[in-house]
């Protein structure tokens, strides 16, 4: 059995090979700069090893002056023989010297060529892709085309449409086996799985057999990071759900709605305390995710601000939250809700406002603070608020798991709208399950470790489901 499977990163200069190498390797290698011919020598890096089998990724110098090179090659009898026997000066003939280095790597090392295109340049405008493909054609190695610089993550249909256009454009080159999205800044590990699948399809015999082991190990490693990320998020959510702040019990008159000033300031302080702990935990969980994904940097004040922004202005309390609250809240609030349910009153109706001023103030409080009082006589985040926390946890995970190491140190970006929509839709569909786990966290007769397990199962299922929706199997490229 062969001991190595070798992938060569090839492209026109400055398309992002070294950047993608960093993202795939999860470590900084080489030099990255927005200039031509930054990488000058071929460099090998170990992507993953299984026993004595290794997956090797070569970063190479970029092609330059490709159209002119192709013309010269077309004029000679044995183009590759001529090409590899030329002596070009590294300083004065840099584009040709670099092209020769890259092609030497393809000829001598590559099992598969990973050819990067800068997809931000228009298909027709990419004047060097065709000549470079013609030159690569002479060497006959299989080529997988990777679309780089595609921008922020996009819905699967959009990515598939772009892949289709490029595939269509490149069908005239039989060496091109596949075209897939692989943006060095914003790819997700799920797409790396697709890349492995695609590479496997072009290998044959013993190489393929060896590669499958490597590919499985690669996926296992990514899945382990996923599992640990879900654990970190479940721990954070668990701590938020258990977090409670003791408050004074209401007097009989206060329950009726009189003299509620001190109760309200108590609740307001409680919310402040809960918010601060929540922001701190959100930041902690983000930093854990950053380390798990082998990224550099910290998520600091941005997380705090993010948490405040996300939670400061509660949205309209929806009907379902009332049944959740009535199940566990004690005192006037629960009593009020039960009364209201029994009486068939609606909050939009004048009956409530006219007849139950005390009740209205309790309603206003819970709406403003998103808190509930549980059996332990402490205020906790409400079920509705918890649901928002779950959404934020998933969105945070998506942000970190898409952030390519080649992009540099971690920073927050605006969320892609389709993530937000998909997460909202998913949590709406899973409302009952999320609520079930939240309710259990407030029950004194259910052990913390049991709820912790349930929280982890919930987050793992949600994490898997959101990734499945964002990267549906149907969008897997043809191989
Ligand atoms: N927006 C964006 N920029 C990228 C991406 N990949 C690389 N870049 C930028 O493109 C520029 C070139 O990146 P390199 O990785 O040095 O490119 P290269 O292909 O190795 O270039 P040479 O070694 O000079 O041939 C840098 O400024 C990168 O930050 C990407 O996925 N998205
Ligand atoms: Mg480079």
Image: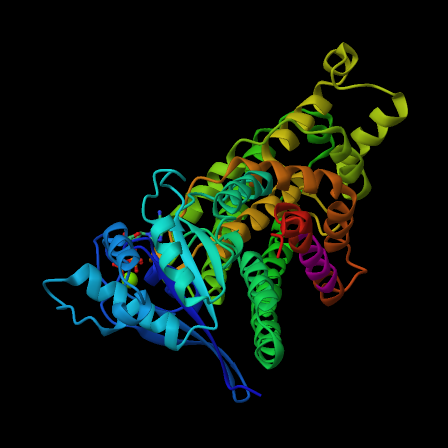
Q: Give the main secondary structure, helix, strand or loop, of the magenta stretch.
A: helix
Q: Is any atom of residue 346 visible in this view?
A: yes
Q: Is residue 247 magenta?
A: no
Q: Position of residue 276 (x, y in %)?
A: 48, 48
In terms of depth relative to the viewer, which is nearer, 2 or 35?
2
Farthest residue to the front: give it: 77
Residue range of the region highlighted in magenta in the rendering: 453-462
Q: In this view of the protein, which residue sits in the foreground, 465 or 62? A: 62
Quadrant including the C terminus = bottom right
User: In the image, residue 79 lies at what x, y percent?
Assistant: 31, 65
**Is residue 299 something one can see in this rendering?**
no
Report the coloring of the rendering: rainbow
The N terminus lies in quadrant: bottom right
Q: Is residue 384 above or below residue 460?
A: above
| 346 shown above or below 293 | above
Q: Nearer the viewer, residue 265 or 236?
A: 236
Residue in the picture at 37% in, 49% down: 129
| Residue ID at (21%, 62%) | 96
* Front residue of 444 and 146: 146
The picture quadrant for ligand 2 comes to bottom left
**Residue furthest to the left:** 92
């Amino acid at each position: 059995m062969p001991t190595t499977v070798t992938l060569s990163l090839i492209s026109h200069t400055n398309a992002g090979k070294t950047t993608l190498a960093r993202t795939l390797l999860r470590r900084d290698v080489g030099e990255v700069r927005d200039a031509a011919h930054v990488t000058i020598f071929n460099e090998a890096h170990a992507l993953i090893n299984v026993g004595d089998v290794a997956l090797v990724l070569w970063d190479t110098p970029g092609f330059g002056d490709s159209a002119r090179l192709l013309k010269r090659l077309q004029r000679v009898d044995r183009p590759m023989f001529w090409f590899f026997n030329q002596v070009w000066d590294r300083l004065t003939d840099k584009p040709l010297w670099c092209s020769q280095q890259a092609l030497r790597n393809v000829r001598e090392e590559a099992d598969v060529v990973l050819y990067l295109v800068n997809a931000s340049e228009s298909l027709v405008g990419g004047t060097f892709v065709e000549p470079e493909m013609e030159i690569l054609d002479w060497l006959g190695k299989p080529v997988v085309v990777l679309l780089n610089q595609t921008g922020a993550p996009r819905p699967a249909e959009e990515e598939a449409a772009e892949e289709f256009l490029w595939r269509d454009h490149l069908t005239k080159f039989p060496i091109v086996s596949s075209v897939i999205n692989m943006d060095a800044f914003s790819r997700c590990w799920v797409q790396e799985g697709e890349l492995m699948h695609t590479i496997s399809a072009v290998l044959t015999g013993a190489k393929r057999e060896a590669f499958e082991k490597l590919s499985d190990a690669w996926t296992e490693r990514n899945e382990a990071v996923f599992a640990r990320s879900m654990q970190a998020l479940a721990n954070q959510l668990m701590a938020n759900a258990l977090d409670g702040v003791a408050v004074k019990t209401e007097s009989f008159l206060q329950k009726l709605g009189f003299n509620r000033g001190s109760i309200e300031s108590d609740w307001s302080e409680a919310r402040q305390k809960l918010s601060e702990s929540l922001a701190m935990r959100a930041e902690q969980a983000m930093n854990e995710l950053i380390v798990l994904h082998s990224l550099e940097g910290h998520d600091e004040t941005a997380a705090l601000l993010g948490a405040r922004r996300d939670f400061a202005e509660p949205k309209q309390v929806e009907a379902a939250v009332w049944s959740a609250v009535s199940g566990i809240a004690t005192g006037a609030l629960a009593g009020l809700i039960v009364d209201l349910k029994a009486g068939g009153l609606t909050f939009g109706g004048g009956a409530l406002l006219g007849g139950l001023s005390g009740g209205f103030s309790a309603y206003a409080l819970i709406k403003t603070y998103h808190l509930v009082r549980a059996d332990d006589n402490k205020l906790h985040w409400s079920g509705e608020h918890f649901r928002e926390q779950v959404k934020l946890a998933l969105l945070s995970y998506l942000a970190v798991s898409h952030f390519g190491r080649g992009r540099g140190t971690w920073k927050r970006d605006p969320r892609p709208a389709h993530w937000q929509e998909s997460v909202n839709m998913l949590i709406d569909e899973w409302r009952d399950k999320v609520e079930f786990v939240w309710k259990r966290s407030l029950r004194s007769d259910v052990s913390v470790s049991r709820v912790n397990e349930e929280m982890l199962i919930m987050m793992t299922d949600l994490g898997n489901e959101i990734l499945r929706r964002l990267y549906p199997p149907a969008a897997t490229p043809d191989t």
